[in-house]
Image (spheres, grey):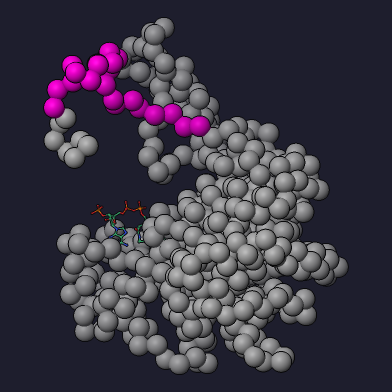
Amino acid sequence: MSRDTLTVTDNRTGATYEIPIAQGTIRAMDLRQIRTGAEDFGLMTYDPGLTNTAATKSAITYIDGDQGILRYRGIPIEQLAAHSSYLETAYLIIFGELPTAAQLAQWELEVGHHSMLHTNIQHLIEAFRYNAHPMSVFISATASLSTLYPDARQIADPANRLLQVQRMIAKAATIAAFTYRHNQGWPNNYPDDGLSFVGNFLKMMFRMTEVQYQPDPVLERALNVLFILHADHEQNCGTNAMRVIGSSQADPYSALAGAAAALYGPLHGAANEAVLRMLEQIGSPANVPGFLRRVKAGEERLMGFGHRVYKNYDPRCRIIKRTADEVFQVTPRNPLLDVALELERIALQDEYFISRKLYPNVDFYSGLIYRAMNLPASMFTVMFAVPRTCGWVAQWMELVADQEQKISRPRQIYIGSPTRDYLPMAARGAAPEGVGA
Ligand code: ACO
């Protein structure tokens, strides 16, 4: 009869151990008993980048990377993109169920109430140079919210947690818009409760002198879809940062700033900005084969391609491509689109990319949509961070309520010097080449 266990024989000692398997996983601490003697610390696993380590149990987002499946709370992303609004999806992600009409109206009202930004934070944003990278400003402004809301440290109080969650979702959009306005040298537009979350965001970003700003319905719909697609993505680099900082019981604004900082890297959320710069560098479809030759030679990286989890296709990319087509109907045609299409066409037929299972990811087309909306490339990652805030805060709520979680503290394999004595300066030889040069 089969048992849900793993039998391990340690060939160093000949000892055999039976380790329980639950949900396709063994507990790393069960390996600690495998020792060669009393002095041995016990067996550990080595997993740089945590490529095969489950650091939490989560009920929020399900991904099957081989099948190209993404679901929030069990609902396929395709259905949410077709029928839901960003705030409704945020409610689902945070509370686990779709809201009733009354719950949604209350939720929209509450989030709307928190969209104003204290003038201290406005002044903070204005204190940065006009050309400061918007993502650096976004990270600083979200971190500084903890100075305004010191009550956020009461993380054991569920009502207080919910209040901070509403604040974070609402203020992320206002911070992003005010950062953009400062970057452009334009005065801020204050939030407008008469619009949807996304419509209000568009107004805060783009209203100029119109008496009655009405967001373009195609752009509002497109941004709504993009916000839904970016709302959560289980244990990625930014979310892991949110959980690692949250595990020390730091306030959620500090954790949010850390998550945004992780998103800022070009291998993560800043890939959309890097894609656009890459397309600009390639310049025209005729230069695509030469660029791909350099990628294959290891001299360049094809930004917007490849994913740690998706090894078939990124389901978000398929929806984004459709959304991009809609946006391009109402905006001037961008010649970089032809470069992107040619890159995708050739790469998908090329053995290098096929054998490594490299497909376009969410960032390949999102940058082109943002560019069509007239946004500078430096704003693209901020456009990612605004909706991802709801995923970060949902994951933080889950972490705080999870009795199994502990402060995040990995192990290491020490490869440095064995113990040695401090040498007085006079007794030290010449520095090895390169050290202190
Ligand atoms: N261009 C060229 N080669 C690539 C690319 C790429 N974009 N991505 C992976 N490869 C190659 C690697 O060089 C490696 O080749 P090798 O086996 O010959 O050494 C192989 O494919 C496997 O790649 P890994 O780096 O091991 O894959 P990993 O899962 O660690 O990395 C990542 C995933 C970081 C997303 C990577 O594919 C990448 O750098 N992509 C470009 C950046 C990007 O678009 N990031 C956005 C991801 S989506 C998001 O974060 C929102």
Q: Residue at x 37, y 19 (%)?
A: 9
Q: Position of residue 370 (x, y in %)?
A: 49, 78
> Regarding ligand 1, which quadrant of the image does it lie in?
bottom left
Residue found 59% across the figure and 83% down from its top: 206
Q: Is residue 380 visible?
A: no
Residue sitting at the far top: 38
Q: Position of residue 211 (x, y in %)?
A: 71, 92
Q: Is residue 51 left or right of residue 148?
A: left
Residue 428 % position (x, y): 18, 20
For residue 143, above or below residue 182 = above
Rendering quarter of residue 188: bottom right
Up-down relation of residue 46 to residue 68 (above or below): above
| Residue 159: in magenta span | no
* Residue at the image point whose x is 14% and y is 22% from the top: 429
Q: Is residue 411 magenta?
A: yes
* Residue at image point 70% right, 76% down: 190
> Magenta segment, principal secondary structure?
loop
Residue closest to the eye, 167 or 79: 167
Q: Is residue 343 left or right of residue 397?
A: left
Q: Quadrant of residue 165?
A: bottom right
Q: Name, please, the residue furthest toward the front.
A: 426
Would you say residue 328 is visible in this rendering? yes
Percent position of residue 359, x then y: 36, 66
Query: Which stretch did the figure color magenta?
Result: 409-430
> Does residue 285 appear to the left or right of 102 in the view shown?
left
Q: Is residue 178 above or below residue 433?
A: below
